[in-house]
Amino acid sequence: MKDFWNGLEPKQRKMVMLAAVVVAGALMLEMIIFPFWEAKTKLDRSLQSHQKKLAELKGLDDAFAVQREKISAIQKNAAARGRDFSLFSYLEKKAAQTGVRGNIKQMTSAKGLSSAAFEESLVDMKLEKITVKQLADFLSVAESPTELVRIKRVVVAKMKESPEYLSAQLQVSSFQPLAAWREP
């Protein structure tokens, strides 16, 4: 190899040195710099992805905390109204209070949605020969957030035989805690 090097002219030696430097530089780029750069880029992308996931988890945690507070408030309201609460009897009392108990044509109970902690009770109710004021009075006293009672659906129609009166079909719902979730 030494004979080969000594046999080269100075210009050729410079060219071989330059070629060796270029090859060494290319190998250095290919073996060290580019893999390092790719790993850094991959790490940055992974970091950004994980930061986005963390932000989503924080948002979900906040939403979960809000839902937990709502459930706690519902449990508190349900415990305050008593274990023997019945939506059916509650609506009968409110109808008597507003003077429309005699106008109840039909009331049927049904089970609604259920979750791990609560069960929805539904009552379908049909009122006939009532005035707008009677309906408004009944709706205003029947719906009660503190009693966990809400009006889900109201269908109102004029009565054909007496146009001054209305016929109303209501669906009223309430939530009751399941036995396993009731507070002592």
Image (cartoon, grey):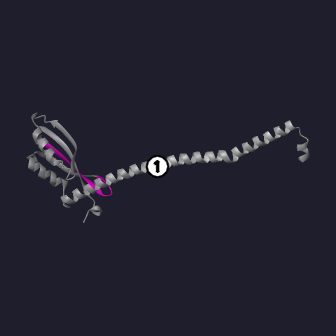
Left or right of residue 7: residue 68: left
The number of discs equals 1
Res 131 visible: no
Is residue 107 found inside the magenta-colored segment of the image? no
Nearest the eye: 62 or 96: 62
Q: Which residues are magenta?
A: 113-127
Q: Residues within 10 Å of mark 1 (few under 14, many from 20)?
A: few
Majority SS type along the magenta span: strand
Q: Secondary structure at mark 1?
A: helix
On the image, which quarter does residue 82 sit in?
A: bottom left
Residue located farthest toward the bottom when viewing the structure as drawn: 184
Quarter the C terminus occupies: bottom left
Against 170, residue 111 (above or below) is below
Nearest the eye: 53 or 182: 53
Left or right of residue 75: residue 54: right
Q: Position of residue 127 (x, y in %)?
A: 14, 43
Residue located farthest toward the front when viewing the structure as drawn: 10
Nearest the eye: 54 or 148: 54
- Residue to which mark 1 is pinned: 53
Q: Residue at x 75, y 44 (%)?
A: 24
Q: Residue at x 15, y 45 (%)?
A: 140
Res 61 visible: yes
The kind of residue on which mark 1 rests is: Lys
Left or right of residue 24: residue 151: left
Q: Residue at x 56, y 48 (%)?
A: 43
Against 36, residue 117 (above or below) is below
Q: Position of residue 30 (x, y in %)?
A: 70, 44
Q: Residue at x 32, y 52 (%)?
A: 67
Q: Position of residue 8 (x, y in %)?
A: 89, 40
